[in-house]
Amino acid sequence: MSDNREFLRFLFDAAVVAASPAACMPLWLEERPKGNVVVVGAGKAAASMAAIVEQQWAAPLSGLVIVPYGHGADCDQIEVVEAAHPVPDDSGVAATRRILELVSDLGDEDTVLCLLSGGGSSLLCAPAEGITLAEKQAETQALLKSGAAIHEINARRRELSAVKGGKLAEACEPASVITLIISDVPGNDPSVVASGPTIVDAVSARDADVRILATSDDALQAAALRALEQDINPYILGDLAGDARELAEEHAELALDIAAGNGPVEPPCVILSGGETTVHVTGTGRGGRNSEYGLALTVALDGHPGISAIACDTDGIDGAGDNAGVFVLPDTLARTADDARAMQANNDSYAFFERVGDLVMTGPTRTNVNDFRAILVRSEG
């Protein structure tokens, strides 16, 4: 596979498939519990997870899951409601209230199956007493623009919520609760995914029936195996966080060292990483954290002929854009007359990659184990 763009997209697709509900759920779904089974949940993978539950478990089932607009899937017994992400809206609030009603009158022989994935925090939204939706929306927008890390944002979300931080599990009592998670958070703390509606904290998770089905590690390992099949050495950095631009500059330095024969692995190789970066928005442009990373990498590599990269969100949506992420190719800079540094300063990474034709477009993947980055170093010099 000699084409850099094709190879990098091949790795990203393999990573997404490895984290899909179809790949990760069947082994974790044991025999259907006795009694009533109510399926609830929220997140970008919630509808596709619900569809697998319907395939694996016999009727009757009932319940409701909430997904972002455009992330639905066909379910026969479990209702799918679409709502706003990453800033909540009235649809999410109304659907969350219906979930609370569905679990409020169950007995000790009944079971609630809670399906959680990234994006669930904004979708499963029931403002705490004395808090309005408008106040939650304003604070969420401010936190997203501030560059705060996801665990900081979700900690505040729990404070403002009547359903997060274990409050949904309290509403389910005395029914049993099983929580299935596709994790989008570094470290995979189940109390952080979707702000932990069935889990108060990591300690309480030890006594709960919580099953983490897929993580960033699964995606990175799948990509590494595909690289080895193509005789490309994988070099896995794992889950990473921090400022998107700063991380891109660090990765550019590593890739350049490898290309010069001074790195920890010899080319041809691919540097793989996941996790979630942050962007401190100061400009008026458009772009998600992966395109922000990609533009900083483009500037730092300055058209090096032996280095290419892809940076995408595994959910298929980079921030509030319609792209999954971006390609960074040796000729990316040469194909534009735009001032890359000026566009970077204005947080206008989407426009930069749109003009050169290096956006990665997938549509919603209906899973989410957060970011996927691959830097391909083909040759020295």
Image: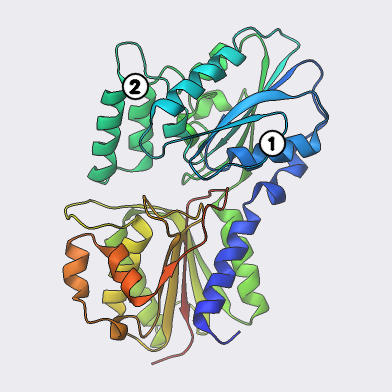
Q: Quick one: 120 or 369, which is closer to the camera?
A: 120
- Say whether residue 324 is left or right of residue 227: left
Q: Quick one: 148 or 128, which is closer to the camera?
A: 128
Which dot marks residue 160?
2
Residue contact at pointers 1 and 2, CB within 8 angstroms:
no
Which amino acid, mark 1? Cys
Q: Quadrant of the C terminus?
A: bottom left
- Element carrying mark 1: loop
Vertical relation: 292 (above or below) 153: below
Q: Which residue is mark 1?
A: 75
Which amino acid, mark 2? Leu
Residue at x-position 61% and y-position 84%? 1
The answer to whether residue 339 is visible is yes
- Element carrying mark 2: loop
Comparing marks 1 and 2, which lies closer to the viewer?
Answer: 1
Residue at x-position 52% and y-position 73%? 8
Vertical relation: 288 (above or below) 142: below
* Displayed quadrant of residue 16: bottom right
Tell me which label, 1 or 2, sits earlier in the chain: 1
Residue at x-position 45% and y-position 70%? 310
